[in-house]
Image (spheres, rainbow, N blue to C red):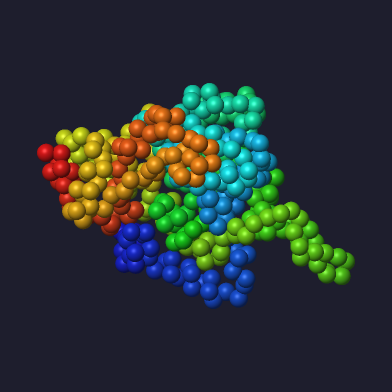
Amino acid sequence: MTKVASEMYINKMFGVTQEEVDAILEVLRTPRYPLYGEQIARFEKEFAEHVGTKYAVAVSSGTAGLHLALIACGIGPGDEVITPSHSFHSVADCVLFVGARPVFCDIDYDSFNIDPEDARKRITPKTKALMPVHLNGHPADMDPIMEMASKKNIHVIEDAAHSLGAKYKGKMTGTFGELNMFSFAPGKHVTTMGDGGMMTTDREDLADKIRMLCNHGRGPLFKKVDEKGFPASIGNDILGYNYRISEVHAAVGRVQLRRFIRGEAGPEIRREHVKEYEQLLRNTPIKTPGEKEWAYHSYCRFITKAPRRDDLWLFLRQKGIRCGIPYYPSVHLNKTYVERYGFKKGMLPVTEQVAQEVLSFPLRRIREDIPRENTERVASAIKEFYK
């Protein structure tokens, strides 16, 4: 029996044990400013080694990371960024933050991810970046995305918030783009028990730029001293943001990452739970998520397609069963985007169809969480509804 398996989980939903508490206490006992330190540096190094990139930079959230990635790539007013509308609206919001225009493309009906052919049709001379989202843990089809980006000299920024552990043709997601974002929000495979994110890249210049941008724009000038050791400047080199992660969050993230790497939390456990759902829902109209032949799905979320979705959601809620309706309405039909751009229904038919069908159910993070009888109860109630 592993050490973790024999421990008492403090919080099974998030896989938290005494190990996280001890890591926090170590930071609290250390007489060092808690925004710069060894926990952050080690977290970045360990994460980059696991994912397979040269550099990783920790930031305060996934959204902060995407915002900084767009700035680091020089995206600004007059530019266009192509991204799916079936996603969390913060992805497109970051495009607005830098003054650019989001161009929404349709999705693949089975994987919920960006449709490369539809994206290709939307490229114009103003297109400066493609932002594929590896939604729910299923990788996007990256080969055609990278091919069109190379031909058109377009930046690629991966949103890998859901896809830690996922692979595209055997290669980890978050390693294809120039800059790539991972999230450590509570629902992700690895959480810092709050917000947190990590940017990965193989380019040293972009890693350095993200480090400056997330720390108020402080760079080489901030670190310089004169011949007497007096600081040359306590100001900034460029305009930046307070998007730093703390030592406390990094310490928790390190513990969670180690557990993830050991297989005591993460994709394999969730894939086992998905198989339970598939078996129990076999004779119902519910369509469980698929997996492309080139994909390894990490199942950050379990998203089904359900006929009469809204009625089913209400029925399950009355029975005390927790389920969700993710990304509804689609981003292009959110009030912010309708009012700003006049978007209307019908512009993205697959996306809009999916938004009317998807229904999510909880997946266990650790084997000790969500017993099989809970899954059986969900399946039984679904069968009752469709009868």
Q: Quadrant of residue 340?
A: top right
Q: Position of residue 227 (x, y in %)?
A: 88, 66
Q: Position of residue 256 (x, y in %)?
A: 44, 58
Q: Quadrant of residue 125?
A: top right
In which quadrant is the N terminus drawn? bottom left
Please say whether residue 386 is visible from this viewpoint. yes
Please say whether residue 45 is visible from this viewpoint. no
Image point 53% across, 37% down: which residue? 341
Q: How many marks?
A: 0
Q: Position of residue 130 (x, y in %)?
A: 56, 34
Q: Nearer the viewer, residue 366 or 261?
A: 366
Q: Is residue 192 above or below residue 208?
A: below
For residue 17, side relative to residue 155 (left or right): left
Q: Quadrant of residue 271?
A: top left
Q: Nearer the viewer, residue 319 or 368?
A: 319
For residue 25, side relative to residue 304 (left or right): right
Image point 26% across, 35% down: which residue? 287
